[in-house]
Image (spheres, helix red, strand yellow):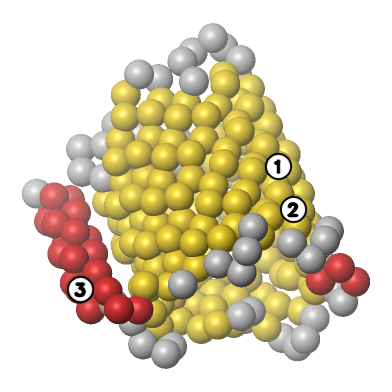
Amino acid sequence: MKRRAAFAFACVALAGAGNAGAQQLTRIDVAASRAALSNGSEDWRETSVALSAALTPAWTGIVRFEHSERFGVSDTYVEVRGERGRGRRIAYAAVGAAPDAHFRPRWAIKAGLAQPLDESWALLGDVDVSGFAFEDVVSVRLGVERRFNLANASAQVFAIAAASEAASAAGYGWRLEAQATPRLRLRAGFADAPETSDGSIMPVTAWSLAGMFDLSDAVSVRMDLTAEERGRFRRDELAFGAAWRF
């Protein structure tokens, strides 16, 4: 009952944010992905839509819908996020829900911060507390970012830990990003860390590559490639996305 109430609250918040910020919509993001599994199971699929609106000069509201299909079942997750700040200094809090979900969190509470130390260095932190069908999971990510003048590049290194009543694990990851051309930005990443998207704490080794291309000042597209070793099987994902800025 509490989970249904949380989902209803998220929907009410979405409606309120939409009415209050209808004249201040700043961004729309859409994405779709498909992942092939090495164990012969049916491909995983995911689609998402996110709406961003400037609620005040300092605050941005973001509502995100995600529909996921895995192993013959599907879940729809809705998240409402409040974000304060611009540029490199950002703090956020979010709540989400997927009532009666099979593998996505039935409820989730998240918070995070990016805090610059100077023009080159910044501290990064995220915490996620999620309730799944069979147990609750807490995950934390802490890291540092270094920015470079050359190619407007950045490098991140972070530690990741996850825990539930049944298990715990920790790992690390890194990400590199650079401006290849005035319109094309490239990103590469690696992680050897616990993954908790379905409620289980699974050690995963993942490589990722992404390209973001600005078609204009208002429209950009992206493509992501991800290869994961998930213990019992390998997952190879191809994702496409687009963003409209207002």
Q: Is residue 144 visible?
A: yes
Quarter of the rendering containing residue 134:
top left
Q: How far apart are labels 1 and 2 at the CA level? A: 8 Å
Secondary structure beneath dot 1 equals strand
Pick out the residue farthest to the top.
Answer: 40
In the image, taking residue 182 as reference, residue 170 lies left or right, namely: left
What amino acid type should be assigned to the residue bearing mark 3?
Asn
Kindly identify the residue that appears in the image at 29 percent across and 41 percent down: 76
- The circle on residue 19 is 3
Q: Is residue 27 left or right of residue 63?
A: right
Residue matched to label 1: 208
What amino acid is found at the position of numbered circle 1 in the picture? Answer: Ser
Residue at left offset 40%, top offset 57%: 50
Q: CB under 8 Å between callouts 1 and 2?
A: yes
Q: Residue at x 62, y 49 (%)?
A: 222
Mark in front: 2 vs 3? 3
Name the residue that disc number 2 marks.
Answer: 187
Left of 158 or right of it: where is 29? left
Distance from the alpha carbon under mark 2 to that under mark 3? 36 Å
